[in-house]
Image (tube, rainbow, N blue to C red):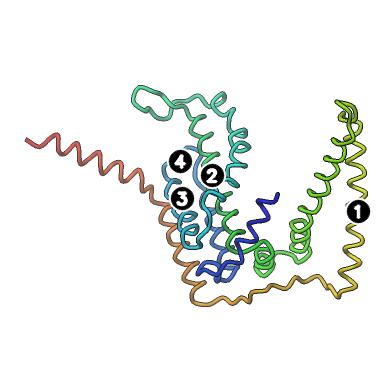
């Protein structure tokens, strides 16, 4: 949870990517996700060039690549669990790697993992270069209902508070337990109920304090925004590249060209 909090800290940096309007970055990431998801279940090589986008943003925004990779790695096991049974149901052979036959189930499983890696990486990078508050504001300005945007902001802000309270309650239970006593499902259920009541009471106090300070449902950002020529160039250039990569399988074309080159060399006297 503390590591996820660092994403918002990365968003206050001053780079060319950070200074772009949040709407341009949100639109580019949405187009990126839709484009990646639109590939067929057996298309693996065509999605590989899409790693160019997250790599370029990480480099231009000076983000810690290892930190981003750790956050993405948390999601990969869940994606693998979704497609792990595909080889049992789809056993039709699709390709041969030398003498090794690869069924469609393995290809679709790898496709799920690759899609998850690309989309989650793009989402994490978006928060790291924009900030969750700015992302919600951009989504609202792009058409998201205001109550939903406010709910997302509150969920993000107080999820860490709830996690800290749960960690303290769990630590207190462990310190008061003797051996395995007090560590069963019964005490855990009681602790969860008390945590829910404390969270409800704290939410009421926070709401009253915000109303007393003049809160009217709007979060104000420290950084101003404006959609200008840099944002338009960022949006158009990346969208054009995504469309080219979507309808042109560059790795497959390179493979065919290399194969044709070697075959032509063998046929020469």
Residue that label 3 marks: 51
| Residue at 74%, 65% in the rendered image | 145
Which circle, 3 or 2, is nearer the viewer?
3
Q: Earlier in the sequence, mark 4 or mark 2?
A: 4
Could you give the CA–CA distance between mark 1 and mark 2, rounded to whole angstroms?
38 Å
Q: Is residue 120 left or right of residue 180?
A: left
Which circle, 1 or 4, is nearer the viewer?
1
| Residue at 28%, 41% in the rendered image | 256
Can you give x and y, in whole percent of width and height, for residue 158 in the image?
A: 79, 56
Q: Is residue 129 above or below residue 79?
A: below
Residue that label 4 marks: 43
- Cβ atoms at labels 1 and 4 below 8 Å apart: no
Residue that label 2 marks: 115
Residue in front for this viewpoint, 216 or 106: 216
Could you give the CA–CA distance between mark 3 and mark 2, rounded to whole angstroms?
11 Å
Circle 2 SS class: helix
Q: Is residue 241 above or below residue 101?
A: below
| Number of residues whose C-alpha sits closer than 10 Å to that of mark 3, classed few (under 14), some (14–19) or many (20 or more) | few
Which circle, 1 or 3, is nearer the viewer?
1
Can you give x and y, in whole percent of width and height, for residue 113 in the image?
A: 54, 39
* Quadrant of the frame with the C terminus: top left
Could you give the CA–CA distance between mark 4 and mark 3, rounded to whole angstroms?
15 Å
Numbered label attached to residue 200: 1
Numbered label attached to residue 4: none
Can you give x and y, in whole percent of width and height, for residue 91 in the image?
A: 50, 24
Quarter of the view holding residue 188: top right
Q: Is residue 133 left or right of residue 188?
A: left
Could you give the CA–CA distance between mark 1 and mark 3, rounded to whole angstroms?
43 Å
- Cβ atoms at labels 3 and 2 below 8 Å apart: no
């Amino acid at each position: 949870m503390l590591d996820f909090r660092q994403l918002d800290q990365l968003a206050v940096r001053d780079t060319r990517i950070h200074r772009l309007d949040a709407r341009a970055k949100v639109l580019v990431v949405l187009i990126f996700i839709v484009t990646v998801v639109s590939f067929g279940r057996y298309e693996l090589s065509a999605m590989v060039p899409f790693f160019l986008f997250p790599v370029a943003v990480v480099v231009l925004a000076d983000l810690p690549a290892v930190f981003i990779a750790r956050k993405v790695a948390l999601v990969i096991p869940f994606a693998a669990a979704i497609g792990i049974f595909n080889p049992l149901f789809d056993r039709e052979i699709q390709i041969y790697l030398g003498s090794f036959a690869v069924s469609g189930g393995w290809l679709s499983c790898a496709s799920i993992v690759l899609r998850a890696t690309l989309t989650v990486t793009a989402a994490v990078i978006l928060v790291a270069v924009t900030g969750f508050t700015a992302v919600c504001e951009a989504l609202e300005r792009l058409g998201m209902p205001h109550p939903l945007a406010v709910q997302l902001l509150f969920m993000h802000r107080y999820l860490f508070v709830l996690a800290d309270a749960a960690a303290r309650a769990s630590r207190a239970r462990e310190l008061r337990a003797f051996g395995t006593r007090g560590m069963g499902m019964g005490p855990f259920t009681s602790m969860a109920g008390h945590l829910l009541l404390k969270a409800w009471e704290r939410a009421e106090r926070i709401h009253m304090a915000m109303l007393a300070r003049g809160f009217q449902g709007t979060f104000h950002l420290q950084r101003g925004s404006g959609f200008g020529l840099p944002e338009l160039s960022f949006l158009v250039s990346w969208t054009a590249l995504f469309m080219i990569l979507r309808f042109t399988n560059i790795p497959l074309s390179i493979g065919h060209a290399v194969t044709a080159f070697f075959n032509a060399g063998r046929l020469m006297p």
